Image (cartoon, rainbow, N blue to C red):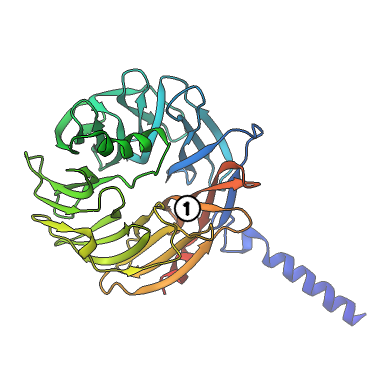
Amino acid sequence: MKKLIYIYTLVLTFFASCDISKNDVLPTNSFTKIYDDNRFEQEYYPLDIIQTMDEGFLILAEVKNDQSLFTSVYVIKTDALGAILSKTEMSSPFVMPVNGWQKIGANYYFVCMDETTLTAQLIPVSEAGVIETAIPLNGITYPLVVTGDESNLTILSYDNANSETVISVASTSSQINQQKGYTIGAGVDVEKPIIDHLTRNGDLLPFQVGKTKEGLYYFNGFYNYTFSLVFTNFGDSPTGVCQGQLSQGGISAVSSLGNDIFGIARFNFGDNYIAPTASISTNSITSSTDLEGNTFPEIENKSVVSIIDTGTSEEWLYGTSTQNNQVVLYGFNQSTGTILGTSYLGSGNPYTLAAITTTLDGGIAVLAQTSLEGRFPRIALFKRDKAFLDELMK
């Protein structure tokens, strides 16, 4: 009898320990979601993710559109557990969304394109996932990528009439505060990689735009026949250029540490390198092939690379995709460039990285593409808690 009472007490203790009200580990801390669709033939390609103040998420994706040269816009709003609260597929003429999400004031914003005029469209989205009236950004065509700060957006785009890569700073009221175009070079062969990127009929290129810690603008895109990292103060010529190798080599991700030191990833004819503390001159011409860094043979060639400053203890979080169809996360020390840890996400189905964002609880959310039964492209979300990140950064 005493033995039975002992076993019964153990069972009660086990279930009490699993009671969320008595446990510091909340169900929102870590989970994995795959967003399926009963329209099996529909193809979804995730682009970017941002956490809202209610601890839910906004996911930006594109949907293959057989009626257009360009993809359609798809927005998902989830709760804190990743459950879908709403999903919206925008109708024509809104096409070709570009990453990434920006929070300015009470709204969240992304940029897409008007299929008829080719003009960039700024789309406000409420925290609840409600898409509001589009704001045309006149003077900006074929948007490629966007970033922002607390008041303005910085947009990289392509001007096919003048064969220029264009960097613009715009307000949420559509005013263009600064803008400058730089030649990509003449010839069909130079333009083809850009068109293939825009129509999703070729390699997706790692276009980026941003500012250094000192406030100097930069973009990663085509300049003078080559995919290059270009530094600019909106003058007639760039202040500095780190040249790539046509469209087959260059920088795939970049983040500024200040004083001409950057965390970067780069690719070169099938090889992939990571350099957490690369020195790049912002006022001279250099070559990406001269940058230091270690090669990572497991990284899939030309895959998306995301670099996140975790905001704690001078750490970089790198994320990308492996040749074994998993998402891989690397932790690095920003000062020494030493690798701190490695973790892999995804099994069973193939996974490729789309984007990473930090979360309000000190963890991360990783947006990825997966394929069900190897044929149906779908959106996947990995939410991992602060303990996971701390372990990776040991």
Residue 197 image point, x, y percent: 37, 38
Residue at horizontal 26%, vertical 30%? Answer: 172
Q: Is residue 184 above or below residue 268?
A: above
**Residue 60 vs residue 260: left or right?**
right
Query: Residue 254's quadrant in the figure?
Result: bottom left
Numbered marks: total: 1
Query: Residue 347's quadrant in the figure?
Result: bottom right
Residue at horizontal 37%, vertical 21%? Answer: 115
Give 99 or 287, whichever is nearer the viewer: 287
> Does residue 104 show up?
no
Give 6 or 117, whichever is nearer the viewer: 117
Callout 1: SS: strand
The residue at the far top in this view is 116
Residue at horizontal 49%, vertical 40%? Answer: 45
- Neighbor class of circle 1 (other Cα within 10 Å; few <14, some 14-19, many 20+) is many
The residue at the far bottom in this view is 2
**Residue 266 vs residue 168: left or right?**
right
Amino acid type, mark 1: Val
Q: Quadrant of the N terminus?
A: bottom right
- Disc 1: which residue: 366
The residue at the far right in this view is 1
Residue at horizontal 47%, vertical 71%? Answer: 391
Residue 33 image point, x, y percent: 59, 49
Q: Is residue 360 above or below residue 155?
A: below
Q: Quadrant of the C terminus?
A: bottom left
Give 190 or 285, whichever is nearer the viewer: 190
**Residue 372 vs residue 272: left or right?**
right
Residue 382 image point, x, y percent: 53, 53
